[in-house]
Amino acid sequence: MQLDTLFYGLIGTLPAFITAQNVSSTYTNPIFPGVGADPWVTRAGDYYYLSSTLTTNITLYRSKALTDWTNAESKVLFNPEYGMPYSTDLWAPEIHAIDNRWYVIFTADPNYDSPPPATDMWCPFNCPAVNHRMFVLESSATDIWDSNYTIKSQLNTYDQFAIDGTYFQHSSGLYHVYSCWETQYSAWPSNLCIAKMSNPYTVKTNFTERAIISVPSEDWEKTPFGRSSNVRLSSNEGPEQLVNSKTGQQFIIYSAARSDNRNYCLGQLSLKADGDPMNPSDWSKYPGCVFYQNPSENVYGVGHASFTTSPDGKENWIVYHGMLDPTNGWPARSIRTQQFTWNEDGTPNFPRPGYGPYEVPSGQTAM
């Protein structure tokens, strides 16, 4: 997520050892050329599919190699028309297979995050994203690549700020989890909200039933670290479902702190066994970042991750964005990936972020 329009081309020239490549049985980060943020990756058939924040449209890329998108095919799924609630600042699109269709869930704004003074005046802090809402595209058929995609709905977020929405699929039903404010004009902090859905494009929970399952109350969730004077820049965002396929344990891995800052990191919520996703007390927060900057390798601002597997299904992989130079803020972000494993207690065991070289995913053909 970002609170300003991405400006491409400011990342500068990356050292040769970290340019996107995949040589023989190893690869190095980043895996996607140039600037990239908020990556979502899923696998279908013989391909990996990737989307990310482009701000002006939603483009889908596909590659047979998770670790090399240099020559990936691309397809624009959605070019918004002018004058609509979703016309500008399209962020964090994700594509999900649900009920024999593909659904793209994304956040957007009607006017470049520039609310009129009559709206902004109600916020205790400057609130450029006050009009950001969640939207859904639906595919025309079952094939992810050959389908056409059209606007299906605006998700009900009770006429309040909503970004970085995702689907949480559970035995009790389908849920919308997203970054929210407590009230319409709060501005900060950004929390994690959950609402139950009747289908991928309809929220059935009313406002009084909407639940806040996480607030940025810990020092590492605030910017600057440990900020105590007020809640400005305190943030939980970018929630993603992660399931341990062997134990059935359910997690939400989310981003904390400020996305243009070196301290941006991943936090972890765990749903207790047989827990109710709508019950905040059934969620527990890990007391610290589970994936965070690695200054010894010049890796900063790691966050907004998604999860996939190796081509043979034997390995688990995290795809995320990070920075080489955190002083450049949002334009310094690039897309990376690394393998992760599981701890004995069933929780994810994430690696330290770095550039590699690393072994390519199991079952991936050398490029």
Image: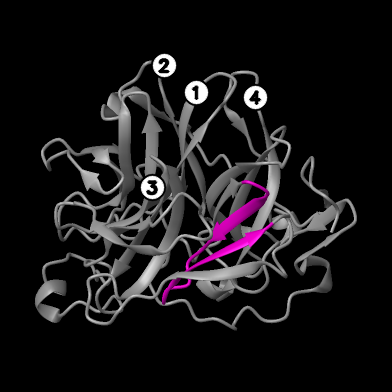
Looking at the rendered structure, the number of numbered marks drawn on it comes to 4
Q: Is residue 263 above or below residue 82?
A: above
Q: Secondary structure at mark 2?
A: loop
* Nearer the observer, 255 or 222: 255
Give the CA separation, mark 4 to mark 3: 25 Å
Q: Residue at x 29, y 24 (%)?
A: 281
Give me the C-alpha separation between circle 4 and circle 2: 17 Å
Task: Report the span colored magenta.
Answer: 45-63
Residue indicated by mark 1: 249
Kindly identify the amino acid type of the residue bearing the numbered disc 2: Ala
Label 3 sits on residue = 166
Q: CA distance from mark 1 to mark 2?
A: 7 Å
- Badge 1: how crowded within 10 Å, few (<14), some, or many (20+)? some
Left or right: 360, with 197 as reference point: right
- Is residue 61 one of those drawn in magenta? yes
Q: Which mark is residue 343?
A: 4
Is 246 one of the magenta-colored residues?
A: no
Is the C-beta separation of discs 1 and 4 under 8 Å? no
Q: CA distance from mark 3 to mark 1?
A: 18 Å
N-terminal-most mark, 4 or 2: 2
**Screen quadrant of the C terminus:** bottom right
- Amino acid of disc 1: Gln
Q: Helix, strand or loop at disc 1?
A: loop
Position above or below: 106 against 278: below
Mark 4 neighbour density, 10 Å: few (under 14) some (14–19) many (20 or more) = few
Q: Which residue is mark 2?
A: 273
Q: In the image, what residue occupies the spot 14% across and 80% down?
A: 117
Write the residue at 14% across / 58% down: 159
**Mark 4 residue type:** Asn
**Quick one: label 2, few (<14), some, or many (20+) residues within 10 Å?**
few
